[in-house]
Image (cartoon, rainbow, N blue to C red):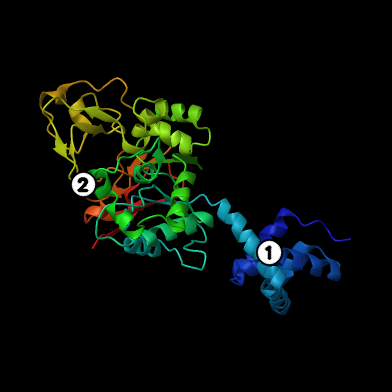
Amino acid sequence: MVDKPSTNFTEAIFLFSQKNNIDPSISYWLPAIFQQGAEEADMSPEDLVMLAIHGDETLGQHLIGIAEATSQSEKGKKEWAKLEERERVFIKKYDIIGDIHGHGGELVKLLVHLGYNNSADGYYHKSRKVIFLGDFIDRGKELVQHKQVLKIVMDMVKNKNALAVMGNHEFNALAYHTKHNGRYLRPHTKKNSDQHRAFLNEFPGESEEKSAILDFFYTLPLWLEIDGLRVIHACWDDKNISVIRALLPSIRLDKESLIEASTKGTKTYQAIEVLLKGFEYELPKGVSFHDPGGTQRTAARLQWWKRDATHLGEVVLPNGLNIGAAASLPLPKDTPVYGKNEPPCFVGHYWLKGEPAPLADNVACLDYSVAKHGKLVAYRWDGEQVLEQSKFSYVVTH
């Protein structure tokens, strides 16, 4: 009778694999092979492993050969592929990537820089996953890389090599292409059409390809809470997140909720505005500025991650915006504040410039203006609760 393998047996297998530098796809089969060998030799599996490590190299090489042959068999390859698939599902190391805005070349460079390999099923990493922050599309009338970006993103999500959340540009696209009562939810004004032009140039008219992309946008959650981190496109606001949880338990839009979210005055509209576009404050009369896209704005976004701020001038975006006497006003009572003990939160959306760095110990923005000759940025998260500047990676737009 063979002894039941003990914890020491597992440790011995590990030592044997390390000593012989055995590939994981081969060492996976060693426990079963050693157990069978031990039964034939009428000894414990642990003793057989230790004999192979310390006393009989020929025995060790013979058993490695059996494991290698097993791993290369049709059955072995199928079982290892299933194991890899299961492990990909449970990966808890993430590379979070900011707003892409149709820059396919930069996305490929960044994925390669981060160690991802390309295959027939798209880009993948053996021990990590990507989380995309949305805003895959729009910006740059001359760009012709949307198809490339969307294929990469959709393939990675489909094959469980990435997760993704909705950005305001995916929301805008759904509204732009959806009619209700004979009118488009997002009016086809010159401003809206120009903003969406790069996408329209690559997907003119109606097509199955465009329909599949819009269907994919509907599958995107509005945020993720996973493995100790949070991901949302623009603003983590508990109040509005609670509103969406109550209205949309799946935290995903469908056509009915898209109509609600496109109708000013509804709870869904108010919540989506904050979560996907940021918390805004209407500036005093006569005060305005132009955003990086050239649009004149009379409302400023507020930096909800500045938890110690007390006055409006400390939190308006862009930094340094002159709002006159309003700078000394106290913060609006409903301004979201992200607590210092909350999980790490990653956002995009804000068109930052300069060298990427955390906005707070537990907040990072990964939108560094790739569509304005800036950077496509990722953060390599490995479970840390205090974010580190050294974990940012990026490629520069050319």
Q: State whether residue 177 is above or below residue 198.
A: above
Helix, strand or loop at mark 1: helix
Q: Which residue is mark 2?
A: 293
Q: Is residue 130 visible?
A: no
- Provide residue 119's location: percent of width, then percent of height: 50, 68
Helix, strand or loop at mark 2: loop
Q: Nearer the viewer, residue 163 or 221?
A: 221
Image quadrant holding the N terminus, namely bottom right
Q: State whether residue 147 is above or below residue 20.
A: above
- Provide residue 337's location: percent of width, then percent of height: 34, 28
Residue positioned most to the bottom:
58
Q: Which residue is mark 1?
A: 79
Tell me how far mark 2 sits from mark 1, CA to CA: 51 Å
Residue plotted at (13% across, 25% down): 285
Q: Quadrant of residue 79?
A: bottom right
Residue plotted at (36% across, 28% down): 270
Q: Nearer the viewer, residue 65 or 331?
A: 331
Residue plotted at (37% across, 63% down): 108
Question: Type of residue at label 2?
Answer: Gly
Q: Earlier in the sequence, mark 2 or mark 1?
A: 1
Residue positioned most to the right:
1
Q: Is residue 376 left or right of residue 353?
A: right
Residue positioned most to the front:
182
Q: Is residue 83 left or right of residue 92?
A: right
- Provide residue 359's location: percent of width, then percent of height: 29, 40
Closer to the camera: disc 2 or disc 1?
2
Question: Type of residue at label 1?
Answer: Glu
- Mark 2 surroundings: few (<14), some (14-19) or many (≥20) residues within 10 A: few
Q: State whether residue 277 is above or below residue 213.
A: above
- Provide residue 208's location: percent of width, then percent of height: 47, 57
Q: State whether residue 23 is above or below residue 317.
A: below
Residue plotted at (80% across, 70% down): 37
